[in-house]
Image (cartoon, helix red, strand yellow):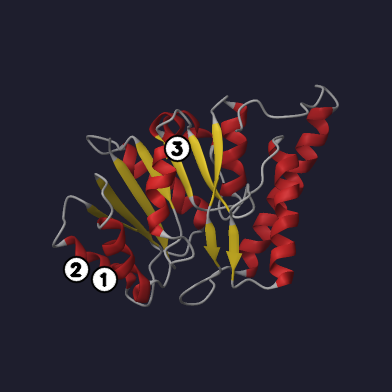
């Protein structure tokens, strides 16, 4: 069993070394891929130094500008599939300690049961959000209600960024992923539904931006809202032609 962990980064120099060391300490045969958007704080330089000690286990994908989370994830997928031996499971997570690396084995364990997309849920029973304001929680909840309508599935946390993807899923849906920013989280769930892949949520604790500063820009927020509006309009047109499903048979 092989596992890869993708870490999209922008200005994570203060976090990336300790996070990589904690991930390496897990009892997993894994590769770590950092997709860095030309961080001016030297994030890539920290990763390059770490690579000297683990050249075959730590990889760096350097990009020319801050190009968005969506393209960072798809570029990471492309890189991993290009390896001589692509990993069987691919973890995507934040690099700011919002996600606990100790939860990685839990995601992989569930994926091994036959699920192609395992989502670490903040809102499933047993999940928790720490350090987030009431306003931010309400916005997140609303976004997830809307996302559930878009993907036509009864889910608790469509927008969570802590996930495990199967290689089979990535190979099938990668050509259909076109998100630029944070809407990638909804699009990947939607593609799993459309292609009949099995989805599972497990509870996690999310710590709101535990280290560093938020990097969500106004442009990225606008792109996310635009995607939601277009997707909902697309669903409205589709629902006039085909009866809407009442419940997803791919979610568990």
Tell me where residue 145 appears, x and y as whole percent.
75, 48
Say whether residue 63 is visible.
no
- The answer to whether mark 3 and mark 2 are in CB contact below 8 A is no
How far apart marks 3 and 2 lie (CA) works out to 33 Å
Residue drawn at x 82%, y 22% as measured from the top left: 243
How far apart marks 3 and 1 lie (CA) works out to 32 Å
Residue 12 falls in which quadrant of the image?
bottom left
**Earlier sequence position, callout 3 versus callout 1:** 1
Badge 2 local density, few (<14 within 10 Å), some, or many (20+)?
few
Above or below, comparing residue 237 to residue 217 in the picture: above
Determine whether, in the image, residue 240 is placed left or right of residue 250.
right
- Which mark, by number, is residue 88? none
Tell me where residue 137 appears, x and y as whole percent.
69, 64
| Callout 1: SS | helix
Badge 3 local density, few (<14 within 10 Å), some, or many (20+)?
some
Residue drawn at x 33%, y 68% as measured from the top left: 16
**Earlier sequence position, callout 3 versus callout 2:** 2
- The answer to whether mark 1 and mark 2 are in CB contact below 8 A is yes
Residue 193 falls in which quadrant of the image?
top right
Tell me where residue 179 appears, x and y as whole percent.
57, 47
Residue drawn at x 43%, y 64% as measured from the top left: 65
Which residue reaches farthest left?
Answer: 53
Near-viewer residue (55 or 138): 138
Q: Which residue is mark 2?
A: 49
Which residue reaches farthest right?
Answer: 240
Q: Which residue is mark 3?
A: 110
Above or below, comparing residue 76 to residue 111 in the picture: below
- Which mark, by number, is residue 46? 1
């Amino acid at each position: 069993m092989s596992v890869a962990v993708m870490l999209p980064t922008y200005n994570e120099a203060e976090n990336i070394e300790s996070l990589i060391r904690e991930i390496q300490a897990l009892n997993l045969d894994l590769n770590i891929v950092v997709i860095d958007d030309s961080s001016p704080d030297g994030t890539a330089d920290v990763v390059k130094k770490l690579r000297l000690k683990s050249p075959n286990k730590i990889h760096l994908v350097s990009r020319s500008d801050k190009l968005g989370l969506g393209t960072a994830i798809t570029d990471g997928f492309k890189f991993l599939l290009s390896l001589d031996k692509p990993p069987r499971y691919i973890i995507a997570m934040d690099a700011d300690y919002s996600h606990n690396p100790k939860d990685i084995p839990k995601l992989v364990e569930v994926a091994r049961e036959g699920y192609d997309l395992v989502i670490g849920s903040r809102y499933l029973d047993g999940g928790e959000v720490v350090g987030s304001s009431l306003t931010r929680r309400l916005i997140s909840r609303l976004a997830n209600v809307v996302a559930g309508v878009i993907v036509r599935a009864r889910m608790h946390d469509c927008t969570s960024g802590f996930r495990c993807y199967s290689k089979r899923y990535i190979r099938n849906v990668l050509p259909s992923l076109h998100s630029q920013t944070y809407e990638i989280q909804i699009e990947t769930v939607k593609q799993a539904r459309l292609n009949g892949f099995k989805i599972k949520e497990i509870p996690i604790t999310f710590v709101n931006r535990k280290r560093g500063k938020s990097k969500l820009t106004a442009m990225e927020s606008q792109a996310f809202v635009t995607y939601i509006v277009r997707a909902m309009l697309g669903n409205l047109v589709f629902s006039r032609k085909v009866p809407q499903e009442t419940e997803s048979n791919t979610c568990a």
